Image (cartoon, rainbow, N blue to C red):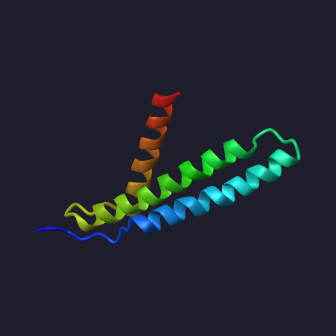
Amino acid sequence: MSIAFDFYYSEFVFQVLLASLLGGLIGLERDIHGRAAGLRTHLLVSLGAATFTILSIFISKRCLIQAFRPTLGELQRKSSRELASWARALS
């Protein structure tokens, strides 16, 4: 039995590009005024945050469909632990 998900790549790309654009605008404004974290930093942080949030929502919807049905709080704690472990591994 296959499960259909409400996940469209065009919607994902649009949301990630919008987050990158808005983060880039904030970074550009900081760059113009000579502040520490500029365009590149805000662009990458907003891109990572948007991707992580979108995938977290997608995974939580997928897990809620399955039989064990964890609560949303459990899913958020699990995803934050995974993010922290990736950050430690990449640093």
Q: State the image quarter where residue 68 is shown.
A: bottom left
At 27% from the left and 63% from the top, the residue drawn is 69
Q: State the image quarter where residue 22 is shown.
A: bottom right
At 81% from the left and 48% from the top, the residue drawn is 30
At 81% from the left and 53% from the top, the residue drawn is 29
Q: Closest to the observer: 15 or 69?
A: 15
Residue extending farthest to the right is 33
Relative placement, left or right, of 28 versus 2 is: right
Q: Position of residue 61 (x, y in %)?
A: 34, 65
Q: Quadrant of the N terminus?
A: bottom left
Compared to residue 40, the image places residue 76 above or below, namely: below
Q: Position of residue 10 (x, y in %)?
A: 43, 67
Compared to residue 27, the image places residue 62 above or below, namely: below
Q: Position of residue 8 (x, y in %)?
A: 38, 68
At 60% from the left and 60% from the top, the residue drawn is 19
Relative placement, left or right, of 56 versus 67 is: right
Numbered circles on residues, count: 0
Relative placement, left or right, of 80 versus 36 is: left
Relative placement, left or right, of 38 versus 23 is: right
Q: Position of residue 62 (x, y in %)?
A: 30, 63
